[in-house]
Amino acid sequence: MVMGSLPEDVDLAVVGGGVGGYVAAIRAAQLGLNVTIVEKDKMGGHCLNYACIPSKTMIKVADIFYETQHSQKFGINVQGASINANEMLNWRMDVSAKLERGVEFLCKQNQIEIVKATATFLSSNTLQLTNGTSLDFKKALIATGSEPVVLKGFEFGGNVIDYKRALMLESIPKSMAIVGAGYVAVEIGTLYAKLGSKVSIIARSDVLSRFDRDAVELVKKKLQELGAKVYTNATPASHDASSVTLNSGEKIGAEVIVVAIGLVPYTGSLVLENTKVKLDKKGFVQVDSSMRTADPSILALGDVVGEPMLAHKAMRQGVIAGEVAAGQNSSYDNMVVPAVIFSDPEIAIAGVIEGEGISVTKFPLSALGRAIALDTTNGFVKIAYDKDQMVKGVEIVSDEASSMISEAALAIEMGATLEDIAATIHPHPTYSEAVMEAAEGALGMPIHFFVPKKSSE
């Protein structure tokens, strides 16, 4: 499909219409460039159609269903609550479709052409498209994202699926085994456990092994409450239509097996050897701080250029790439990329919470009015700071942590101090007060919790 007529040549050709690609296209068009996006599937890419948005949509549905059945403490008793998997899937698909139409509308309003095709580089200034046309460009942007890693012996097919298929099931499986222990595994495992599946998570070491153990233990405790089982220090050896066998010989029932062991950059169809673009040892496109590759005519952004492989990083890089393509002297110099795990409770991190010269103060949600009122006291806020009381990092384990972490990111970017946060009025009663309380505690002036004073000896 071509929205409008395909120009013979363009100022900027964007390969990939995901969140990084379309943001770059819009910014470049705002700055006067003639822009074409080449997208082989759906506008909005994996984030809008297969990953970020669908998973958070289904997590919310699962939360509602679970809370409906577990609200007796509030005086709410619901008998016979059930989930209609088809209607849930329809809602999830409709959300993605609505957002995809929104992106297409924005592109149209910014006079950006969208070509539905796969692109291959013929040279540093020409793309060959699978619709039979070629496209000459002054600048090109690689925004092709990533794809799931395939596990040998557990290739996708039959009852072995990736995270995308896991978010498109037409029925709730009675049992599900998830191979992998990162945030995707935890999010999918939590949502299906709340929907009633017997979930098993197979972890090579432990779930969320790169994250703060104080936070992870709360997530593991909730998984256990939901009936999900985490197999630590385990490796899947084989599988059949109804089970997974571990290297220990133990067999786990699994109607569906989700392999979620990571992502790899997607560059295979681009034929980059026809350009001067260089890849690193892991297959990521090498770029500088202005998103320029080794080829003067080609830029790249998002998952395809490396970690962290997060949509919001790609969107920020999209703004930079669009400006650079238009001749501006822009640079990706952000100090922090917030990370969020939509687990139960949510985990959100900005900056660092450990390291040389860093001190940390922890505020427990058990001392927060909002958390007590909603019975969500299993959480905390940690605030990290240096000897000059500059905020270096914040970790939030709480309901709504995903919304709260932006304050921390802004504080770090602007060089805020503990006093800047403590002296900022936070609305009451909210979870966000916990960030202020943590800052007050770090300053030795806690109001709603007690921190013993350090000995002067």
Image (spheres, grey):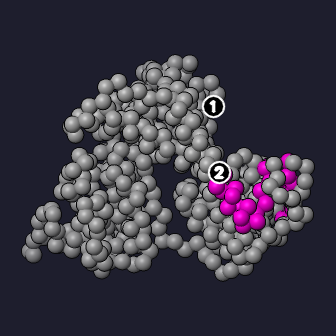
Q: Nearer the viewer, residue 1 or 268?
A: 1
* Horizontal arrangement in the rendering, residue 126 relative to residue 50 (left or right): right
Image height of 128 relative to 350, above or below: above
Residue 317, located in which quarter of the rendered image?
A: bottom right
Q: Nearer the viewer, residue 335 or 71?
A: 71
Picture coordinates of residue 107, whole percent (x, y): 71, 61
Residues in magenta? 101-130
Judge whether residue 106 is colored magenta.
yes
Residue 250, located in which quarter of the rendered image?
A: top left
Q: What secondary structure is found at the residue carrying circle 1? A: loop
Disc 1 residue crowd, few under 14, some 14–19, many 20+, Cα 10 Å:
some
Give the amino acid at mark 1.
Phe
Q: What secondary structure is found at the residue carrying circle 2? A: helix
Residue indicated by mark 1: 156
* Quadrant, the C terminus: bottom left
Picture coordinates of residue 56, whole percent (x, y): 48, 46
Residue 454 visible within the image: yes
Judge whether residue 368 is colored magenta.
no
Residue indicated by mark 2: 100
Residue at 54% x, 44% y is 54
